[in-house]
Amino acid sequence: MSLPPSSSRSAREPDYLNSGPLIALGILGRLESSFGGERDAAALAAVRFLRERKLRWGDVVLPNLGSARTEVDSSDLATCIRNLDQLTAWERQFVVSLRSFPRISAKQLAVLRDIARKARAAAA
């Protein structure tokens, strides 16, 4: 099966939204095969399908999950880091761990904001 090249992508919508669903359904349908070799080939084809489109599994399996994540609030993070001595060991570890993530969940953001509020109050 020949897959369309990723360079044919529309500027406004990803290629997998155009011809991709039909190809993906064909690939995924083979995962139900009772033959291990066919399932293995389908899995490899699915990975190739994503790679050619510069996508990850999360982009197609849970495409709306990205909207549930938000950028780290750099001012809250900076406040916490400046006041690490005012935080508990768990809060320090949490704040430091966020530095490696460009996007965090809504729950993580809420925790960061609470910790930053605590750090601001302790510094005042």
Image: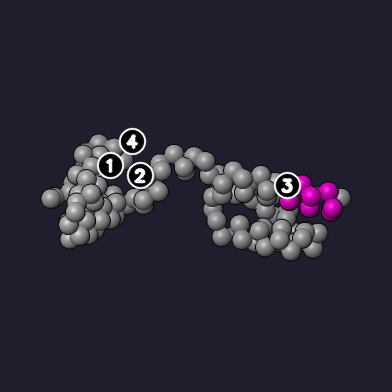
Task: Check residue 120 for magenta coloring.
Answer: yes
Horizontally, is 75 left or right of 72 in the view? right
- Residue sitting at x 61%, y 61%: 97
- Which comes before the other along the chain, label 2 or label 3? 2
Instruction: Tell me, yes or no, whether the two marked residues, 3 and 1, touch with CB atoms within 8 Å.
Output: no
Nearer to me, 71 or 88: 88
For label 2, the residue is 60
Picture residue at 56% right of the left edge, 46% below the top? 105
Q: Is mark 4 on a helix, strand or loop?
A: loop
How many badges with numbers are in the image? Answer: 4
Query: Foreground mark, 3 or 4?
Result: 3
Q: Measure the C-alpha gap from mark 2 to mark 3.
A: 33 Å
Q: Classify 10 Å Cα crowding around label 3: few (below 14), some (14-19), many (20 and above).
A: few
Q: Is mark 3 on a helix, strand or loop?
A: helix
Alpha carbon distance from label 3 to label 1: 40 Å
For disc 1, the marked residue is 16
Q: At x 19% / y 44%, what residue is drawn?
A: 26
> Who comes first in sequence, dot 3 or dot 4?
4
Frontmost residue, 45 versus 40: 40
Magenta residues (range)? 114-123
Residue 32 in sight in this render: yes
